[in-house]
Amino acid sequence: MPALASRTIHVGALVALALTAAACGRPPELDKQLETLSSWTATMQLAREEHGSGAITTTYATQLRDAASSALEETKQTIGQTAHSKVDSSYAAAALDSLRTAIRALNAETGS
Amino acid sequence: MKKWGEVALGVVTSIGGFLEVGSIATSTQAGAEFGYRLAWVLVLGTLSLGFLMEMTGRLAAVSQRTYADLLRERFGYRFFLLPLAAVLVVSFLVLASEIGGVSIALQMATGISFSWWAIPVALLGWALLWRGTFGIVEKGTALLGLVAIVFAVGALKLHPAWPAVGRGLLPSMPRDDRARYWYLAVSILGASISPYLYLFYSAGAIEDGWTIEHLGVNRVTAGLGNLFGGGLAVCSLIAAALVLAPREIRVDRYEQIAMVLASPLGRAGFVLFLATLCITCFGSTLEIVLALAYTMAQGFGWNWSENLKPGKDARFATTYTVLILLAAVPVAIGLNPLTLTNVAMVATAASLPVTVIPLFVLMNDGDILLKHTNGWLSNGALVFIALLSVVLLVAAVPLQLLAGG
């Protein structure tokens, strides 16, 4: 569990760095998709914290996870068409990976 | 003493009635994306609604006729069809959003998809309207809606930097994402200045038997009630600014909003958020469907009163029955309630001129209002709101296309 959590933070930091470094020259549509992925990654991390502290129910955390999984699937289908350069593709892959990891971390927390 | 009781009840019902799906969604979206920067729009919307409610309440108390009645009488039947159509279309969208709000709250509580809840929620609402009285609908749901005060508790618990909040009360321009900023501003105004609110308020004044004696009650209710209600919307913006914005969480789904209270208040905050969403949206569902039925009945000259048995005002009762069941359909077929809400709020903003501009004529008509016509302050406010409504009409659709997502 701690390894999973630290990996989430590590990948999250990489994505954040990539977002900052590459803010110029990226297609706006890709920017929007990366923002969506990053937002859902952060949502998963917050949900994991709140579930851990007992603030939210497992039922609710599971719904959040499902919503994040839907966002992941939708973005996965379309991000390939907007990430034209190699650099863009690597940011997209890192963002997708970060969200996948965050979803797994929430799954581990809720025991589902 | 009785008057002060009415004032207290009026203020309390306004607090509970102000916060609903549109204001919760748009203020938390604004807080998550722009911190405190859009707080000024909430203040503007609250003040505008306060003025409009005071005027339509005064109009009803003095003339003993509702705003919809007077629209038809003063401007003619043909003209009346324009505001009627606009109010019907946009309020129907808002009504569907409110049913979506209740359904999503029930989904978060039970895990059963919101689309399954839409029809039972509509049926429960219909049963309450069919069996209940105006007092139950207005005061019952609004008193329960006081649970929304949890937003104030949550915001205080997060210890906001008040000078920064204060700066948010002054209009400012963001450095980037301006289209989204203005889109959210328009959505907030659409949520705050919904025509159903002042149409319902005006009909409620007649249902409650207001006369010239109630002008003071009207002023205090419209002023203080909206001030407190708008304050709660600002609190939800503050909570989102402190919980979601630092983590760069954008509100794409209603499910994310519960975190703004779960974070500062723990499990109690989470449960109270669900209760707030459920109760305030249910209360608004009843208010909107009644406002629509009132407007149609008053416009077409049918019998109307929530206090009458359905058999005594059959066309009025049929109207709310059909509307509440139809409005459940978009949610039952699975339309995302947040998308529905955002579209409804922008459409509402765009529809404002047809109900706001005629009010200027009515509020200055001495034959209707005797010596209670508008003074310079009310007229100034109404001209400002009318101009604002025209700007919203022009800007709403382009902003929806540019930044609506």
Image (cartoon, rainbow, N blue to C red):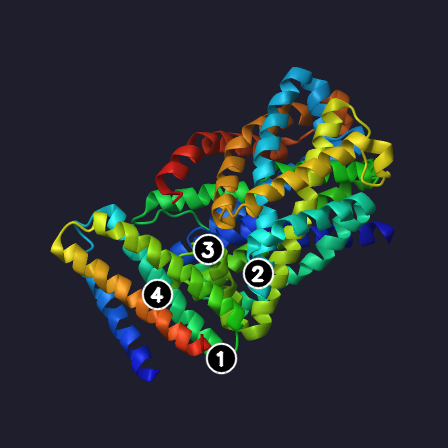
Quadrant location of the N terminus of chain B? bottom right
In the depicted view, which residue is nearer to us: B271 or B384? Answer: B271
| Labels 4 & 3 near each other (Cβ < 8 A) | no
Label 3 to label 2, Cα distance in Å? 16 Å
Q: Which residue was labeled with disc 4?
A: A41
List x then y, in percent, for residue B195: 61, 36
List x then y, in percent, for residue B327: 61, 41
Residue B231 higher or lower than B91, as above or below: below
Amino acid identity at mark 3: Arg
Amino acid identity at mark 1: Ser
Label 4 to label 2, Cα distance in Å? 24 Å
Label 3: chain letter: B
Q: Residue at point 43% right, 56% down? A: B251
Q: Which residue was labeled with disc 3?
A: B253
Q: Residue at point 60% right, 57% down? A: B277
Amino acid identity at mark 2: Ile
Q: Which residue lies furthest to the bottom in this view?
A: A2
Q: Which residue was labeled with disc 1?
A: A53
Q: In this view, does B292 lie to the left or right of A104?
A: right
Label 1: chain letter: A
Mark 4 on the same chain as mark 3: no
Query: Which label lies toward us, 4 or 2?
Result: 2
Where disc 1 sits, the SS reads loop
Label 4: chain letter: A
Task: Name the disc covering residue A1, or none.
Answer: none
Task: Name the disc covering residue B112, or none.
Answer: 2
In the depicted view, which residue is nearer to us: B175 or B73? Answer: B73
Label 4 to label 3, Cα distance in Å? 14 Å
| Labels 4 & 1 near each other (Cβ < 8 A) | no
